[in-house]
Amino acid sequence: MTWSIIAKDNATGQFGIAVATRFFAVGARVPHIAARIGAIATQALVNPYYGIDGVRLLRQGRVPHDIIEILIAADTGCESRQLHIMDAKGRIAAHTGKECVDWCGHLEGKGFSIAGNMLAGASVLDDTANAYVANEKMPFARRLIAAMRAGEAAGGDKRGKQSAGLLIYGEEEWSELDLRVDDHADPLGELERLEAVSRERWVHFRKYLPTRNNPAGVTDRRIIDAGIEAAIAGER
């Protein structure tokens, strides 16, 4: 009942997942990312433990193909599930159960994986992929959203639209961007708006947060405010 793209940005090393569907709060259950390690999207009749356990297995060093085999072997409902995985080495694996609703399937390219079910047709994934490839110079978050917008223009979820999500991780174990549109007439349009709002202050502020290398981060508000204003001025 969903389609999603998992990608790794060559310029930054970030992992990102964008997802959209005609169902409530898709961003709450589909995307799972382990910073610097890999990403998983679990969808169709979603099994949240595919994401929870899959991320744990990625951290243990298991490869995507083996992770899928482990997850579906433990789930008698696996024929109603869909998931895809990409790790830091660019290895990709996917499972689309026999009971997933047409159109359903998966495709992959260099640095990205796309999967969907209950779609208007195969062109949803094709156009999502083509847009992602074509917008190589676009900033990562906007590139993911543009890819999903192209898939929506090709028909998207054949039932319509309701929710969308965008999750991005960089070097740290906290997300660099975690946007959700849980119930909206134009969820990808609203996601696009929220991403633009994130660039007003959040994307400039996040570099001052605690990191593993700098556990305190920056707490001097004068430095933070001056840095944000300088970053904003540099973009004008």
Image (cartoon, rainbow, N blue to C red):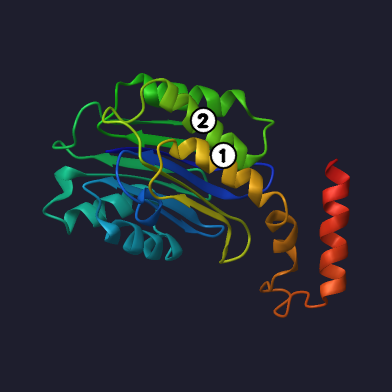
Measuring from the top left, give residue 204's x and y in whole percent. 75, 57
Residue sitting nearer the eye, 174 or 146: 146
Whether residue 212 can be seen here: yes
Amino acid at dot 1: Glu
Query: Quarter holding the N terminus?
Result: top left
Q: Nearer the N terminus, badge 1 or badge 2?
A: 2
Whether residue 9 can be seen here: no
Looking at the image, which residue is at 54% across and 60% down? 35
Residue sitting nearer the eye, 208 or 62: 208
The 10 Å Cα crowd at callout 1, few under 14, some 14 to 19, many 20 or more, is some
Measuring from the top left, give residue 125's x and y in whole percent. 39, 26
Q: Secondary structure at mark 1?
A: helix
Q: Secondary structure at mark 2?
A: helix
Q: How many marks?
A: 2
Task: Note whether 44 is above or below 130 in the view shown.
Answer: below
Q: Mark on residue 192?
A: 1
Among the 4 quarters of the image, the one containing residue 138: top right
What residue would you read off at disc 2? 147
Task: Note whether 99 is above or below 129 in the view shown.
Answer: below
Task: Note whether 135 is above or below 47 in the view shown.
Answer: above
